[in-house]
Image (cartoon, helix red, strand yellow):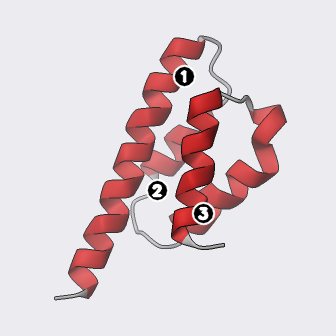
Amino acid sequence: MDELTALTILANTIETCLNKDLAASEVFAALNFLAARVPAKWPFLEFHQRLESGDQDVRRQILNSALAAIKLLLRARQTISHL
């Protein structure tokens, strides 16, 4: 798996708002893959926990926020590694 594939899996999960049971193994593999690349873990934990949220609109909003934070962390890591 690469970062683009992992991010695509997470984005697709948000688009369809799949619950944990339907997307568990692929989504969790993507989260673990990306989390291993950055020091901050909170957005990954937030994404994981909100997969089980009951309200679909709230779930979508929080998952989008967590994914945005994940992307920022990955970009920051790339920027720092190029310095």
Q: Is residue 83 above or below residue 42?
A: below
Q: Amino acid at mark 1?
A: Arg
Q: Is residue 10 above or below residue 79?
A: above
Q: State which mark lies toward you, 1 or 2.
A: 1
Which of disc 3 and disc 1 is earlier in sequence?
A: 3
Left or right of residue 10: residue 62? left
Which of disc 2 and disc 3 is earlier in sequence?
A: 3
Quadrant (top left/top right/bottom left/bottom right) for the N terminus: bottom right
Secondary structure category for the residue under label 3: helix
Left or right of residue 16: residue 41? left
Label 1: which residue?
Answer: 59
Observer-nearest residue: 4 or 51? 4
Residue at 65 percent across and 13 percent down: it is 54
Give the alpha-carbon distance from disc 1 to disc 3, as whole Å.
Answer: 22 Å
Give the alpha-carbon distance from disc 3 to disc 2, as whole Å.
Answer: 19 Å
Observer-nearest residue: 14 or 73? 14
Residue at 45 percent across and 28 percent down: it is 62
Label 3: which residue?
Answer: 5
Q: Amino acid at mark 2?
A: Lys
Label 2: which residue?
Answer: 41
Residue at 38 percent across and 35 percent down: it is 65
Which of disc 2 and disc 1 is earlier in sequence?
A: 2
